[in-house]
Amino acid sequence: MNKRVGIAGLGAIGSAVAKKLTSDGGIKGFELKYISEPKDKSHKNINKVSFDDLVAQSDIIIECLPANIVTQLAEKAFKANKDIIFISSAALLIYPQIMDNLAKSKSKAYLPSGALCGLDGITAMKEMGIKSSKISSTKPPMGFTGAPYIIENNINLKNITSKTLIFEGNALEAAKGFPANINVAATLSLAGIGAKKTRVEIWADPNAIGNKHQITVKSGYSTLNASIENMPDPANPKSSVLAAQSIVATLRNMSNALVI
C-alpha cells in the first residue's frame, strides 16, 4: 500500500515535488493525497486541507514553507509522531524548539541535500572528527532581496557592480540573516560540526549566472573540496531547481531496496 503524502507549502519547490508525485509513474511507494494550499487550482484531485488535517491524515509530510512557519507544522507533526521531510533546514537552527520537540517524539525527520553536494562524504568524515568546515555561497545580488541581514544593514543590492562579500560569520548567524537563501549552510552544519563552528561566506555577484556553493571540510585524515553551481529556480530565484529534486531523491531512497 502506498504511503499517503502531504505537502505543506506549494511554492516553487512544493509544486515541483507535487508534479513529480502526480506525473506518469509517480514515485514508487508514495501517493500525494493532501496539500495545504486552499487556493491551488492546478491539482484538482488533491485534497486541500489545513495543517491539522494534513498532519492527521498523511503518513509522511513534506515541508516546503518559509522558515518562520515551519515551527507550526513541526510541532503538530511531532505531537502526532509523524515523519517529516524538511527542506527549510535554516529553520532548524533559528528555532531550536523544533529539534527539542523531535527528540521528545517518535517521529523521524529527513533532511535532503538541497542544493548541496558531498554530504555523504561529510557525514563519513564526522565519524573521524571534523576539524573545520566552511561554505562559500555566491548568488546574483537580487537573489538576496528581502533577507533580514540586507534590510538591517541597509544594503542596496542594485548598487553592487562587482563580486562583493556581503556576509561572513557562522551558520547560525547566516541562517538568521538569510533564512530563505542559506539552507545549504544550515544543512552543512547539521551534517558536520554544528552551526557555531561552521564558517559561512556569502557573496553577491552581478555576473553570476547561477547559485554557486563551494565547500571545504577538513578532518585529520581527509580534506573534502566540493563545488556545485545550480541555475536558480525561475519561480523562486532564492532557491535552485536542485532543491526540489533532492526531496524526490529522498522519497525514492525511502522505498528503494538499494540505497545509495
Image: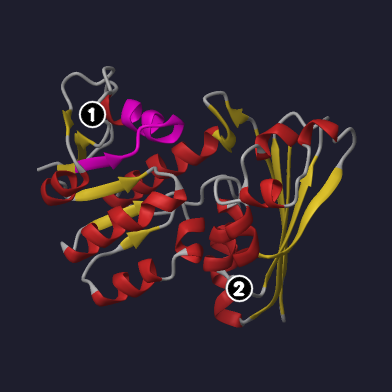
Magenta stretch: includes residue 10: yes
Determine whether 78 is above or below 25 in the image: below
Residue ID for mark 1: 38
Identify the residue at image location x=69%, y=52%. 152
Which of the pair 29/94 is nearer the observer? 94
Q: Label 1 is placed on what type of residue? A: Pro
- Mark 1–mark 2 distance (CA, rounded to whole Å): 44 Å
Identify the residue at image location x=40%, y=29%. 16
Identify the residue at image location x=78%, y=38%. 156
Determine whether 68 is above or below 242 in the image: below
Q: Name the secondary structure under disc 1.
A: loop
Q: Label 2 is placed on what type of residue? A: Met
Residue 53 seen in the current view = yes
Side (left or right) of 139 relative to 91: right
CA neighbours of label 1 inside 10 A, class few (<14), some (14 to 19), many (20+): few
Mark before the other along the chain sequence, 1 or 2 = 1
Residue ID for mark 2: 125
> What residue span does the magenta drawing correspond to?
5-20
Q: Name the secondary structure under disc 2.
A: helix
Classify residue 141 by image quadrant: top right
Side (left or right) of 142 relative to 176: right
User: Residue 132's spot in the image, x, y percent?
Assistant: 72, 74
User: Residue 195's spot in the image, x, y percent?
Assistant: 59, 70
Which of the pair 51/126 is nearer the observer? 51
